[in-house]
Image: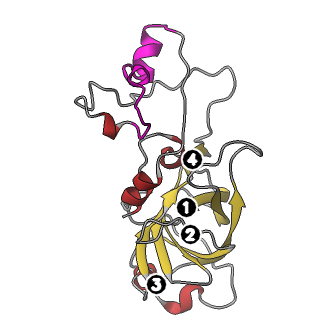
Amino acid sequence: MHPAAALTAVSLSCLFLAGCGGSGGDAPTAAVAPGGGKTVEELWRAPGDDVAVVAGTSNHEPGDVRVSFLVVDAEGRVVTRPTARVWVAHALDDKPFLESTAKLERIGVPGGAEADATHIYVARVRLRRPGTYWLLAEPEGGRMVQALGNVVVTENDSPPDVGDPAIASETPTLVSAGGDVSRLTTRTPPDESLLRYSVAESLRAKAPFVVTFSTPSSARVARAAL
């Protein structure tokens, strides 16, 4: 399971709403039909805010999958209710085959600085086969909000271990962004010295470097969710 750029990189992106389908064979975990017989899209279009989930994890392996995410309502506010109902389907126009509950968990270092998002939803679902699944989350209680996104399950996609070669990521730079610093960071004032070289360029140059991660501003979270 890889930490998703949506929560760790300075250029936040929400979990993309792309890709349909997945391998069949998964069975519902509840005695009744998950979602009351409605499709994922019908559940998403129910009264309330229809938004996209903000991913906390990506590229999961088959089996017991731990999925984490934020839910940001239409007003740009991070939802922090204790639990959220979760449905999973193979396609947007399919009925869910699985229903579960996500619980809110605190993130960050105890005693450390407070970030814009201090809690995240975590759900555990059994997805036995690789594929792109659709996930719908609905925080329980209060104003209705439904968040939709994808869960990507791939075979043997474990993260690099200690001692493995570093991933040569073509991270965005000032040059690739055309000098538009706002596309790269929300820091004020921006530290442009950290934005000159990509990870791949530094690896090719065999130059020592440190990769830093930070939580984006709440305004960036809101724009990504909408």
Q: Nearer the viewer, mark 3 or mark 2?
A: 2
Give whichever of discs 3 and 4 has the lower sequence position: 3
Q: Which residue position holds label 2?
A: 79
224 versus 193 height, above or below:
below
Please tell me whether mark 2 sits on a helix, a strand or a loop: loop
Type of amino acid at the residue the image marks with label 2: Val
150 on left or right of 80: left
**208 or 20: nearer the viewer:** 208
The Cα–Cα distance between marks 3 and 4, rounded to whole angstroms, is 29 Å
| Residue at mark 4 to residue at mark 1: CA–CA distance | 25 Å
Residue at image location 51% in from the left, 91% down from the top: 37
Where the C terminus falls, by quadrant? bottom left
Residue in view at x 71 percent, y 60 percent: 105
Hey, which quadrant is residue 138 in on the image?
bottom right
Which residue range is magenta in the image?
A: 185-207
Closer to the chain start, of discs 1 and 2, is: 1
Q: Residue at x 49, y 8 (%)?
A: 207
Q: Mark 2 or mark 4: which comes first in sequence? A: 2
N-term mark: 4 or 1 = 1
Residue at numbered disc 4: 155
- Residue 179 at x, y = what percent? 25, 29
Who is closer to the viewer here, 15 or 220? 220
Q: Compared with residue 80, is residue 107 higher up or lower down, i.e. above or below?
A: above
Helix, strand, or loop for circle 4? Answer: loop
Q: Are marks 1 and 2 in contact (CB under 8 Å)?
A: yes
Q: CA distance from mark 2 to mark 4?
A: 32 Å
- Magenta segment: does it hold 186? yes
Report x, y in % for residue 209: 53, 15
How far apart marks 3 and 2 lie (CA) works out to 18 Å
Q: Which mark is residue 70?
A: 1
Q: CA distance from mark 1 to mark 2?
A: 8 Å
Question: In the image, is residue 60 part of the stretch drawn in magenta?
Answer: no
